[in-house]
Amino acid sequence: MKGKIYEKDKYGITYENGKIVRVPAKNDYMFKNLFGVNGKEENLKGLLQAILKIKIDSLEIQNSELPRENIDAKLGVVDVRAKLSDGTIASIEMQVKNEKNIGERITFYICKIYFSDIKKKKDYKQINKVIAIAIIDFSYFNRKEYHQIAHLKFEDCKDEDEIVSSILKGKEDEYVTDKIEVHIIDLKKFKKIKNPKGELADWLNLILGNEGAIEMAIQRNEDIARVNEENKELSEAEDWAQFLRDMARYDENTRRRYEMEDMAKKMLKKGIAINDIQELTELSKDEIEKLIENK
């Protein structure tokens, strides 16, 4: 690290003396090629063990396109999908831009996977556990943790007249089912922590391309050391100038879309007809009607 001066641009790409030396693994293409293609099972296993805090004997990387129920059904594609040795199905979605729907998106993905597994089984008890993971570069849920974990759980009853404690034997059940599990990794919150510790923190520093922290992490973890080298090789091999142009265009399209949505919301409040809003904002009728539903 001595004598080396690194600079980062707004996409998190690291430069040394003007030359690209690392495109962070939070980049969609980079993430899929490091963790989501055949031959990268050990990479994915290391990352999943750090997130889930479990030992994984082996896993099989699967097609990331989720099956449709029929020809008209919405297509779902996650970045990475794998089946673990115990039958658990895990998916990972890397989301850099805040499309303001990550809660609904991750619910859609986990339901698609769960339902597709139901169709293959003859008994509900045989359905595999499904874990949906979203790594996001923005804060979405109002939670203090950067690693947020959710299950389908019971809540405390609010009406005392409904409580029949005299017939309860043993400890109260906590989960409706343990076969649905959600993990949100909030990179924006993670970046606010000074010197974060632990295996997951090491992986997240690699994903973000934090050079100093990576140098220390590769001394502790041979999986991270291997993925680090693959990350750097891919960073040197691809035409990232085209990627930067594409990202600039995507940023502009996203900015314009948010502006049009804000304009449409103001027009709806004034009672302007949907057809007129379509003409002025170039939003589709379905998009405008969704804004009405979410008011």
Image: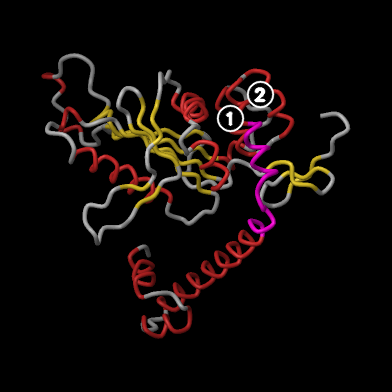
The residue pinned by badge 2 equals 217
In the shown orientation, is residue 160 left or right of residue 292?
left
Q: Main secondary structure of the magenta part?
A: helix
Residue 124 percent coordinates (x, y): 15, 32
Q: Give the quarter of the image for residue 133.
A: top left
Residue drawn where x is 74% and y is 30% of the image = 212
> Where 220 sits versus 135, above or below?
above
For badge 1, the amino acid type reads Trp
**How busy is the neighbourhood of tag 2: few (under 14 within 10 Å), some, or many (20 plus)?**
many
Quick one: which residue is furthest to the top in this view? 170
> Where 171 sits versus 279, above or below?
above
For badge 2, the amino acid type reads Ala
Q: Name the quarter where the C terminus is drawn.
A: bottom left
User: Is 239 contained in the magenta span?
Assistant: yes
In the shown orientation, is residue 141 left or right of residue 123?
right
Q: Which residues are magenta?
A: 228-244
The residue pinned by badge 1 equals 203
Residue drawn where x is 79% and y is 47% of the image = 19
Badge 2 element: helix
Residue 205 percent coordinates (x, y): 63, 33
Q: Cβ–Cβ below 8 Å for labels 1 and 2?
A: yes
In the shown orientation, is residue 92 left or right of residue 175?
right
